[in-house]
Image (cartoon, rainbow, N blue to C red):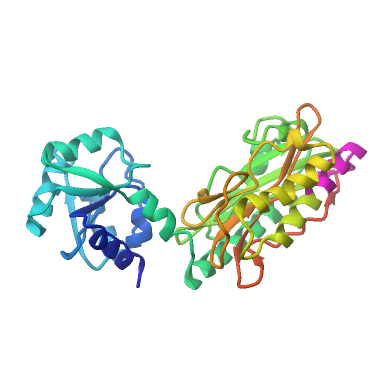
Amino acid sequence: MNHLQSLQKWVADSGYDVAYISNPTDIMYFTGFSSDPEERVLALFVFPEAEPFLFTPQLEVGAAKKAGWNHDVYGYLDHENPFAIIADHIKERTANTTKWAIEKADLPYHRYEAVQEQFPAAEFPGNASEFLDQLKLFKTPDEIELMKEAGRQADYAFKLGFEALSTARSEQQVVAEIEYGLMKKGVMHTSFDTIVQSGINAANPHGGPEKNKIQANALTLFDLGTVNQGYMSDASRTVAFGTPNDKEKEIYNVCLEAQLAAMDAAKPGITAAQLDAVARKIITDAGYGEHFIHRLGHGIGTSTHEFPSIMEGNDMVLKPGMCFSIEPGIYIQGVAGVRIEDCVYLTEDGNEPFTHTTKQLQVLPVK
């Protein structure tokens, strides 16, 4: 059963009349068509028995058909009311339009109101967001192969970034070298804004690359990923550009020990909370617990951050086919920041990472 058939079965089994999928990433997951519609309406409508249809801006109808979608595609012009046109096509397919499933974690309120305007009797008992979390939790072998290639692309991006380090370049210029090198390889999209942080700037775990120059004899943190046919990679490495001091080496070694221990423990049967605790205990016992300020990991697939969260309080049992990150970090303001991350997929008896760049501390020559 493919993804679309699974959605249609859920709609039928749940007694819903129609499901409205609004998130562009989820629409790609079901249709193969990838688009950023910006302010325009992009939507997928699925019914218990009738044929589904894809609704796009008129300027994207041709691209949607070429993407491999084998059902109807309807479009609208900018001056038209998209939801009036959508309502006509829904009514062509079914007289039952009361019970709706929507992506409650995604659908903007003004579009919820637009549906209600066309279907005043509509009720919205179904949460397609929760269903999608469960459906996307287990990756197929084909999906894992796409993510392996994205991982290989991320490994290449690390190579580009390490080679680009120079005291003559800023963090932002190193990012530019990475992304230009990827594009020359035919990798046109990163999965999020590439992060390069040098020295104490890396102690801000969600900071971006700045205009400051790369520091000699300090740690530099890289966090990056690519998009391969809609599937993501996400990985972090921290390297020494020149000779790190003893404190930086200590922080790095503690973080590495935690990451390797969690990688070793990640196998079917452990819970998300237990896996988080494996890494967290090592960092806490070393005296850095207050500086590990985020969850151990997150799911990954068609988005970089998917269900589930690998964190305290999540007692979900991990099973084969799940894909998630393992990324402990230690961030000490004014001193240094270290994060080491691989995304993995669970096998029957362990896990395999998507990225393979060495995690032993690399000391790169200053230039």
111 and 365: which one is in front?
111
Single out the residue that lies furthest toward the right: 246
* Residue 20: % across, % down: 25, 50
In the rendered image, residue 254 lying in the magenta stretch gets the answer yes
- Identify which residue is drawn at 66% across, 59% down: 155
Q: In the displayed structure, would residue 104 be above or below residue 154? A: above
Quick check: 27 left or right of 294? Answer: left
17 and 38: which one is in front?
17
68 and 171: which one is in front?
68
* Residue 256: % across, % down: 79, 51
* Residue 136: % across, % down: 44, 59
Where is residue 210, by image quadrant?
Answer: top right
The answer, for residue 190, to whether it is visible in the render is no
Quick check: 119 left or right of 285? Answer: left
Quick check: 263 left or right of 145? Answer: right
Where is residue 30, by image quadrant?
Answer: bottom left
- Identify which residue is drawn at 50% across, 57% down: 301
Q: In the displayed structure, would residue 180 be above or below residue 292? A: below
Q: How many marks?
A: 0
Single out the residue that lies furthest toward the top: 334
The answer, for residue 253, to whether it is visible in the render is yes
The quarter of the picture where the N terminus appears is bottom left
Q: In the displayed structure, would residue 186 be above or below residue 336? A: below
In the rendered image, residue 149 lying in the magenta stretch gets the answer no
The quarter of the picture where the C terminus appears is top right
- Identify which residue is drawn at 69% across, 53% down: 158
Give the residues drawn in magenta, as a range: 239-255
